[in-house]
């Protein structure tokens, strides 16, 4: 691209698109817009393809994991849940068992990574900090602080239980609960820039971990049953475990699946490899771009990835981009 798209609408125009009312046969659709970058891109790309290829009228619902699940369970909306991480929000598994949501794809087929981390320069200076036992033995070397998830994030539940299980506070490590994803990311950037200690949680794929080289703490063997309990707010006996690689899903409501099977078929194919998503996130951060602008970049640069997601009819409608 020769220039950034100021708005996603500009991107549509630049790519040769106009909304054709004759294609408006999908109807109104609600889709989650989770409050982290990769999910925003997934939603923006999905929305664009649904609107331009299938004639949907798509409304984004700004939300996060726990509120989205609660809303879908109680009201049936949002109808599409993008980038769900059930490993840190096991309410999802309950809703799936109850038939209130249907998994349609692994939107990040490589899986997501949840990790407790320290900067690489800290690990190089103090190799003992590469294990949780080393961190607990030397809390002063990591700054005596654990940087935790914001309230409302699925990872917050698991982190809070792991904090109890490893007795961080008893070992002299204070817990700093960030108020937003922005402050959590900024804390890594600030520490890394100034080569200061940092210890806490972050996940991949993200632009932050593409830009700042962090080392995952060895938290011991992965125990799936323990991790499953830790992911629950009612876990009576939080336990010590490493983070299992996370399954990352897109889901829909049963009503939506029955009503719009063609869109479900599209969503089955909407998948982003971690290297592709990492590149998109880095591009978005470097260019201070919105999710819609990052989606436009993806649609422009990665045509060979997404063109086969579409039905033959949708390909015809999007021929201006594909050719």
Image (spheres, rainbow, N blue to C red):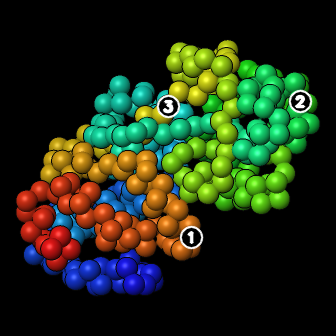
Assign the N terminus to one quadrant of the image.
Answer: bottom left
Looking at the image, residue 27 sits to the left or right of residue 132; the answer is: left
Picture residue at 30% right of the left edge, 36% below the top:
102
Give whichever of 243, 154 is nearer the camera. Answer: 243
Residue extending farthest to the front is 124
Q: Secondary structure at mark 2?
A: loop
Res 152 quadrant in image: top right
**Residue wearing tag 1:** 286
**CA separation in Å, label 2 and label 1:** 35 Å
Looking at the image, residue 201 sits to the left or right of residue 288; the answer is: right
Q: Nearer the viewer, mark 2 or mark 3?
A: 2
Residue 312 x, y percent position in the rendering: 7, 59
The disc placed on residue 245 is 3
Picture residue at 72% right of the left edge, 44% below the top:
120
Picture residue at 56% right of the left edge, 16% below the top:
223
**Residue wearing tag 2:** 138
Give whichever of 187, 70 is nearer the camera. Answer: 187
Residue 307 in view of the camera: yes
Assign the C terminus to one quadrant of the image.
Answer: bottom left
Picture residue at 48% right of the left edge, 54% below the top:
278
Residue 137 x, y percent position in the rendering: 87, 24
**CA separation in Å, label 2 and label 3:** 27 Å
Residue 196 x, y percent position in the rendering: 84, 51
């Amino acid at each position: 691209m020769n220039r950034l798209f100021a708005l996603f609408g500009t991107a549509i125009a630049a790519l040769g698109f106009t909304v054709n009312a004759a294609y408006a046969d999908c109807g109104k659709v609600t889709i989650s817009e989770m409050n982290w970058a990769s999910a925003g891109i997934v939603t923006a790309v999905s929305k664009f393809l649904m609107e331009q290829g299938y004639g949907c009228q798509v409304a984004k619902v700004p939300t996060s994991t726990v509120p989205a699940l609660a809303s879908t369970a109680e009201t049936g909306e949002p109808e599409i849940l993008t980038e769900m991480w059930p490993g840190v929000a096991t309410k999802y598994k309950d809703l799936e068992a109850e038939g209130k949501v249907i998994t349609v794809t692994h939107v990040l087929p490589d899986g997501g990574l949840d990790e407790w981390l320290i900067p690489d320069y800290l690990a190089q200076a103090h190799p003992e900090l590469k294990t949780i036992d080393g961190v607990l033995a030397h809390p002063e070397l990591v700054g005596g602080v654990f940087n935790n998830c914001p309230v409302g994030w699925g990872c917050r539940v698991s982190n809070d239980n792991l904090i109890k299980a490893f007795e961080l506070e008893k070992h002299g490590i204070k817990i700093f609960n960030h108020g937003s994803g922005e402050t959590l990311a900024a804390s890594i950037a600030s520490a890394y820039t100034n080569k200061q200690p940092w210890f806490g949680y972050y996940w991949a794929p993200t632009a932050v971990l593409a830009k700042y080289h962090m080392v995952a703490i060895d938290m011991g063997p992965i125990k799936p049953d323990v991790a499953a309990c830790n992911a629950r707010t009612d876990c009576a006996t939080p336990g010590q475990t490493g983070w299992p690689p996370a399954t990352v899903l897109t889901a829909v409501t049963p009503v939506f699946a029955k009503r719009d099977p063609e869109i479900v078929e599209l969503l089955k194919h909407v998948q982003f490899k971690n290297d592709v998503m990492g590149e998109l996130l880095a591009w978005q951060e470097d260019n201070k771009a919105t999710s819609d602008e990052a989606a436009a970049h993806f649609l422009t640069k990665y045509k060979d990835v997404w063109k086969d997601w579409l039905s033959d009819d949708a390909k015809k409608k999007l021929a201006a981009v594909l050719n």
